Image (cartoon, rainbow, N blue to C red):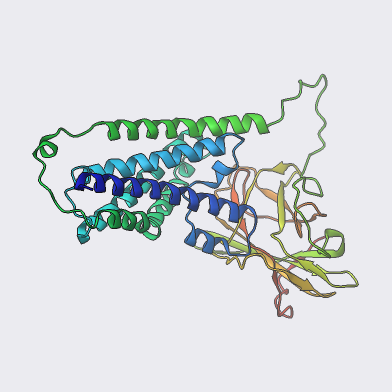
């Protein structure tokens, strides 16, 4: 086999391998975070970077499949374009030369970075106009960092496969190839796929909102009732339960005082077994917020740690009567002046069981986001609950 053939095989291995690993990392990350695998969220993101955003997997069908496909194809097109730019089409880099491997690896890293950049542009367009201008680019930096990190820890595998395919290739002068004009097809394909990725992301998110949002009821014929509508005492979300789980009717919830540092906030809350026998907690808490007037407000709750909290991950904890488990709420300070902010916090051991509520005064506003950790055993309850505020 000549040099040109081995270069083509090596390029195909690199491009296909990069696409497969990009999809593998994003799909496994989304599956593990959605199914609460017994691994901390930080460890999951470190081992399998979020190359395909969680919002993609939460879109209405068939958009998760289409967006993943467009993302993979865009990555493969950018990888091919960068490899051509590095001289692999003409076989200028011998496969057994160290600079060849490094060039291939860097091409994959840059391709992932470019794919994340165009996907982030689509997210920005989909979120326009933002509730706050400062939030417009919140998701861009994490996406770019995840893509670059993926290229570092996974991108060397396709580069190595391509190097092995070409390591026996010997440089053969080819005047025709050397004088051939650059092929514009990879550039056109990469540009087309980038545009498709940018355009389809807003379309997917808009379609999801339209299909998941109930049709507006006809306007009432008389004045609406002034009675506030808050979150129900049980979540509508379905969560499979294990044997002898601690239900909301058999526990009490108490709240600690919030703490703050350098623009970040954290607050602990405890679950105590008030039953006559042992029970098990093995989940993240179910959390919701109402405003001071009792109306439900929309706060995004993310499972995991924050600047002031560490998530131990989900584990089975057996609570004897009187024993407690603890979880932590973490969030960034929000400019709450003039905005609807929290007045009541509702907490249940898991989604679907009875929620307990308590008045709170937190700088968490409608449309904000918080993180919550999984339940963990309180090993030294004496002295640690001095600042708690029991639910009324």
Q: Is residue 262 left or right of residue 59?
A: left
- Identify whether 68 is placed above or below 313: above
Q: Is residue 321 visible?
A: yes
Residue 307 visible in the displayed image: no
Residue positioned 79% across, 73% down in the render: 319
Residue 49 placed where, x, y %?
A: 47, 55
Image quarter of residue 241: bottom right
Image: 137 above or below 323? above
Q: Answer left or right for 235 relative to 99.
A: right
- Frontmost residue, 271 versus 206: 206
Pick the quarter of the image with the C terminus.
bottom right
Q: Is residue 34 left or right of residue 387?
A: left
Residue at the farthest front position = 1
- The answer to whether 60 appears left or right of 275 in the picture is left
From the top left corner, tell me how far across and down residue 162 is, in percent.
30, 53
Q: Nearer the viewer, residue 249 or 118?
A: 118
On the image, the x and y values in percent for residue 208 come to: 61, 33
Most distant residue in the top direction = 221
In terms of image quadrants, where is residue 32? bottom right
- Please name the residue shown 69% across and 66% down the image: 375
Residue 115 percent coordinates (x, y) = 39, 43
How many marks the image carries: the answer is 0
Between residues 212 and 355, which one lies in front from this camera angle? Answer: 212
47 in relation to 120, above or below: below
Quick one: which residue is furthest to the right in this view? Answer: 276
**Quarter occupied by residue 306:** bottom right
């Amino acid at each position: 086999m000549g040099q040109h053939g081995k270069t083509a095989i090596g390029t195909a291995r690199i491009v296909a391998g990069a696409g497969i690993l990009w999809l593998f990392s994003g799909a496994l990350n989304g599956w593990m975070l959605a199914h609460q695998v017994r691994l901390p969220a930080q460890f999951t993101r470190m081992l399998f970077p979020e190359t395909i955003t969680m919002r993609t997997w939460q879109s209405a069908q068939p958009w998760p499949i289409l967006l993943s496909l467009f993302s993979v194809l865009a990555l493969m097109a950018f990888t091919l374009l960068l490899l051509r730019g590095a001289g692999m089409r003409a076989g200028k880099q011998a496969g057994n030369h160290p600079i060849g491997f490094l060039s291939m690896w860097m091409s994959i890293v840059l391709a992932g970075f470019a794919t994340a950049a165009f996907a982030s542009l689509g997210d920005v367009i989909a979120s326009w106009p933002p509730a706050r201008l400062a939030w417009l680019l919140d998701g861009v930096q994490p996406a770019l960092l995840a893509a670059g990190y993926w290229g570092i820890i996974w991108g060397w595998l396709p580069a190595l496969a391509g190097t092995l395919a070409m390591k026996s290739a010997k440089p053969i002068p080819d005047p025709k190839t050397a004088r051939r004009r650059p092929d514009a097809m990879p550039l056109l394909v990469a540009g087309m796929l980038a545009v498709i990725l940018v355009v389809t992301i807003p379309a997917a998110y808009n379609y999801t909102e339209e299909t998941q949002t109930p049709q507006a009821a006809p306007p009432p014929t008389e004045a609406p009732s002034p009675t506030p509508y808050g979150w129900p005492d049980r979540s509508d979300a379905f969560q499979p339960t294990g044997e002898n789980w601690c239900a909301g009717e058999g526990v009490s919830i108490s709240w600690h005082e919030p703490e703050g540092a350098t623009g970040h906030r954290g607050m602990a809350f405890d679950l105590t077994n008030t039953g006559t026998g042992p029970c098990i907690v093995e989940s993240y808490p179910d959390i919701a917020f109402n405003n001071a007037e009792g109306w439900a407000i929309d706060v995004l709750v993310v499972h995991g740690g924050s600047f002031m909290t560490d998530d131990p991950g989900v584990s089975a904890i057996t609570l004897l009567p009187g024993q407690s488990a603890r979880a932590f709420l973490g969030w960034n300070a929000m400019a709450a002046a003039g905005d609807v902010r929290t007045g009541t916090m509702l907490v249940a051991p898991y989604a679907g069981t009875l929620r307990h509520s308590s008045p709170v005064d937190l700088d968490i506003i409608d449309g904000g986001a918080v993180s919550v950790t999984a339940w963990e055993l309180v090993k030294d309850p004496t002295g640690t609950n001095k600042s708690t505020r029991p639910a009324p």
